[in-house]
Image: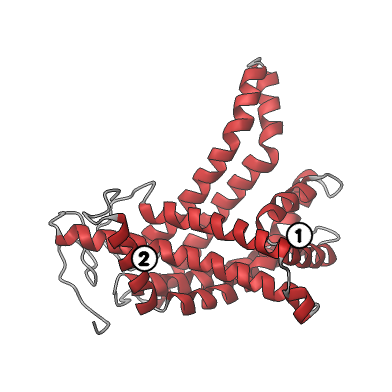
Amino acid sequence: MWKPGGLTWRVLAKRVWSETKRDDVFGRAAQLAYYFLLALFPLLIFLTSVIGLIVGSGTGMRHALFAYLSRVVPSTAFHLIDSTIWEVSTASGAGKLSFGFLAALWAASNGMGAVTQALNAAYDLEETRPWWKQRIVAIGLTLALSVVIIAALLIVLAGGKIADLLATHYALGSIFTVTWKILQWPLALAFMLLAFALIYYFAPDLRDQHWKWLTPGSAVGVALWLLVSFAFKAYLHFFDSYSKTYGSLGAVIVLMLWLYLTGLAVLIGGEVNSEIEDAAAKRGARDAKTKGAKSPRARPNKIKAA
């Protein structure tokens, strides 16, 4: 998969760009941004409620969570998120925890269904799974990604404290603590790559797949997401015209744009995997699938006109 299917990187980039336009990736990313927006606030309510119940509302864990979030999210959008969550999460409780979890699960599973449709389009597949199986896959993926996200957050937010406790309890010394604090960032990145890999493996209606911890699509997706996030944030830092033009609505527009770019990164990563596997199958790779085929041994079932 890393060769990339016998294609040069330039040819691969041209094919991905062509398929991105053909599969209406830009339009589908806008659809994902809508679902991401619906899921974002319930998810943050759930996370802040969990933090309040576990470590207490008087700790600085919530502030640490939003401090790391502010490094990726554009500042205008971050202030909107921070103020909204502060208003609705002044006190943590079981009812709010349940509501946040259920609302986030439902909205995020709808978004995962939209991701499935987009990735099926990338592979030229017709969805044949029954609706209940699609919903189970969407909910299962949502739960799995939630666990991955929470694990990554724990590593970043509480990794230093965990390292100090382990070093003290097992007399590991200061070298272990320093090493852990350095490795926590590559570990957090590994969890992001795992999240993308889970989406690309389970979401499309493909069969007889071989699990790969790292694929070119997941690497490109994560790298593209980080790149556009920091570039968009830098642009808004120097040329923030949305607030001047739209007033208080500028924060909402900036947040939607960032969510749009996030969905775009996920879908482009899927297009990369699709093009590489199609090229590899045409070159005779036994475990690769051509577009429209759900398994290496299946015949393509095209659903789009060339």
Nearer to me, 247 or 145: 247
Within 10 Å of disc 1 (Cα), the crowding (few <14, some 14-19, many 20+) is few
Residue 148 shown left or right of residue 241 in the figure: left
Nearer to me, 15 or 219: 15
Which quarter of the figure has residue 20?
Answer: bottom left
For the residues carrying marks 2 and 1, which lies nearer the camera in this image?
2
Which quarter of the figure has residue 55?
Answer: top right
Nearer to me, 94 or 179: 179
- What residue is shown at x 14% (from left), y 58% (from top)? 283
Residue 299 shown left or right of residue 144 in the figure: left
| Residue type beneath disc 2 | Glu
| Residue 161 visible, this orientation | yes
- What residue is shown at x 48% (from left), y 80% (from top)? 27
Quadrant occupied by the C terminus: bottom left
Q: Which mark is residue 94?
A: 1
Task: Point out residue 194 in the picture as x, y percentages from the top left corner.
Answer: 46, 49
| Residue type beneath disc 1 | Ala
Q: Which residue is tagged 2?
A: 271
Q: Counting residues from the N terminus, which is met first, the one under dot 2 or under dot 1?
A: 1
